[in-house]
Amino acid sequence: MSVVRSDVAGVAQARSVADLPLDDMVDKDLCMNIGLLGVGAIGKTLGQKLSAAGHDVKVANSRGPETIDADVLSTGARAVPVTEAVKDVDVVILSIPLARIPDVAPLIATVPSETVVIDTSNYVPFPDSELDAVEAIEAGQVESLWVSE
């Protein structure tokens, strides 16, 4: 994403958001505490962008914090155990394979009702994949409703 700023001489310059000082990008009063489960392509990008924007981001995966790549943490996100990622946060982002949602459902059930839970998964069953067809979704239930259950 690019932004346009005026330099001292009043000439507009297009720069990458990553080049801007944090104070130019973020109203610190609007920063959130975010827990992110999953650091694949989507989770990694979200973790990097949200922490670069000044949010306090905790990232976790099923293999443990020591297995999270340094590039995921390069903009300030912190690697934590899964149970820690959902504690004391404003938002929980699920960025895990849809087939793993039932595994984390008991953990998500423990977050306070005011915590926003966002799911980035997509229901795409393929033959011979780890995701079998989900009968309720195949019958017409909206994927997000299935995930919330």
Image (cartoon, rainbow, N blue to C red):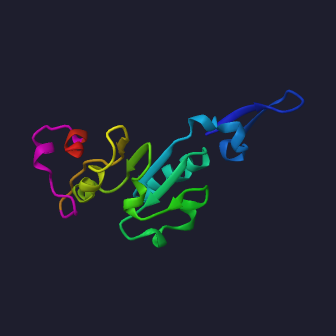
Camera-side residue of 140 and 102:
102
Q: Is residue 139 magenta?
A: yes
- Residue shown at the point (52%, 42%) measured from the top left: 32
Residue under the point 36% across and 43% down = 118
* 48 left or right, relative to 26: left
Q: Residue at x 38, y 62 (%)?
A: 82
Question: How many marks on residues?
Answer: 0
Q: Is residue 101 visible?
A: no
The quarter of the picture where the C terminus appears is top left
The residue nearer to you, when weighing 119 against 40, is 119
With 95 as the anchor, is 70 left or right in this view?
right
The reply, left or right, for residue 126 in relation to residue 139 is: right
Residue 128 sits above or below residue 114 on the image: below
Secondary structure mostly seen in the magenta stretch: loop
**Residue 85 percent coordinates (x, y):** 42, 56
Q: Along the horizontal axis of the image, is 68 left or right of 20?
A: left
Residue 43 in the image: state x and y as whole percent: 44, 54
On screen, 15 above or below 103? above
Q: Nearer the viewer, residue 94 or 134?
A: 94
> Where is residue 88 shown, x and y percent of the image?
44, 49
User: Is residue 87 visible from the viewing direction of this image?
Assistant: yes
In the image, the segment drawn in magenta is 128-143
Which residue sits furthest top? 10
Q: Quadrant of the N terminus?
A: top right
Whole-percent x, y for residue 131 in the image:
21, 58
Q: Is residue 133 magenta?
A: yes
